[in-house]
Amino acid sequence: MVDWRLFEPLFNWARKKSLWIVSFCTGCGGIEMPPLMTSRYDIERFGIIPDPSPRQYDLFLITGYVTPKTLKRIIITYEMAPDPKWVLAHGSCPLNGGVYWDSYNAIKHLDKYIPVDVFIAGCMPRPEAVLDGIHKLMEMIESGEADGWKRYRENYEWYRKNQDELLGEGWREKEARKWIPWLMDKRKEVKE
Ligand code: SF4
């Protein structure tokens, strides 16, 4: 029986060379995504490509402030991706609320709800800073230090408690059920 853990350094090297991004474009930082991915700063040369599928990414970019409504989608998108996966949050807002530190509707510490591997401070950070953060993350992936996905699994009860305190117990089911009347109406419309 092969012990695949022996190959982990090789896997980590390959993982860092082929990061696929799902970008949530939350907050103002979303506007820094296109320059990062086009000819001027060009992250494709590092093997990074954007991909809209929550099943096929391994790098989740949170690009600015997060509201409770968006956080629900972020948690679901995070949980849908297979391991290993990493979260990079840029802008001061996900770090500590930034300029929205006293807003009733902005998340102050994103890492209470999902594990963040690298934060990039700034309001908003320049693409060079984002590239620097991505490089840092690549180094951490190779050395095995980027372990947010393991932390999420090991401390799931703690994350779940924080999520439920903010969003209310059973929020996943309520979100899913919310669409049922709308879907039934659509079905009726199609039949008529
Ligand atoms: S850190 Fe600044 S630029 Fe980024 S989302 Fe917050 S207010 Fe906008």
Image (spheres, helix red, strand yellow):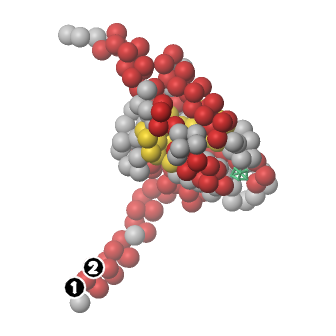
Residue drawn at x 25%, y 83% as measured from the top left: 190
Between 140 and 124, the residue placed more toward the observer is 124
Q: Is residue 103 visible?
A: yes
Residue 90 horizontal/vertical position (percent): 64, 42
Q: Is residue 95 above or below residue 170?
A: above
Local secondary structure at mark 1: helix
Q: Quadrant of the C terminus?
A: bottom left
Query: Ligand 1 closer than 8 Å to the CB at disc 1?
Result: no
Residue 66 horizontal/vertical position (percent): 63, 53
Residue drawn at x 50%, y 23% as measured from the top left: 141
| Image quadrant where residue 82 sits | top left
Q: Is residue 51 above or below residue 2?
A: below
Say few, some or many: other residues with alpha carbon within 10 Å of mark 2 (under 14 / 14 to 19 / 20 or more): few
Between 25 and 186, the residue placed more toward the observer is 25
Q: Which residue is mark 2?
A: 187
Q: Residue furthest front?
A: 39
Q: Is residue 144 above or below residue 150?
A: above
Q: Which residue is mark 1?
A: 191
In the image, what residue type sits under mark 1? Lys
Residue 23 horizontal/vertical position (percent): 51, 48
Horizontal arrangement in the rendering, residue 25 relative to residue 6 (left or right) = right
Marks 2 and 1, how far apart in space?
Answer: 6 Å
Residue drawn at x 36%, y 42% as measured from the top left: 56
Q: Quadrant of the N terminus?
A: top left
Horizontal arrangement in the rendering, residue 42 relative to residue 29 (left or right) = left
Residue 140 horizontal/vertical position (percent): 54, 22
Local secondary structure at mark 2: helix
In the image, what residue type sits under mark 2? Arg
Check if mark 2's residue and mark 1's residue have beta carbons within 8 Å. Answer: yes
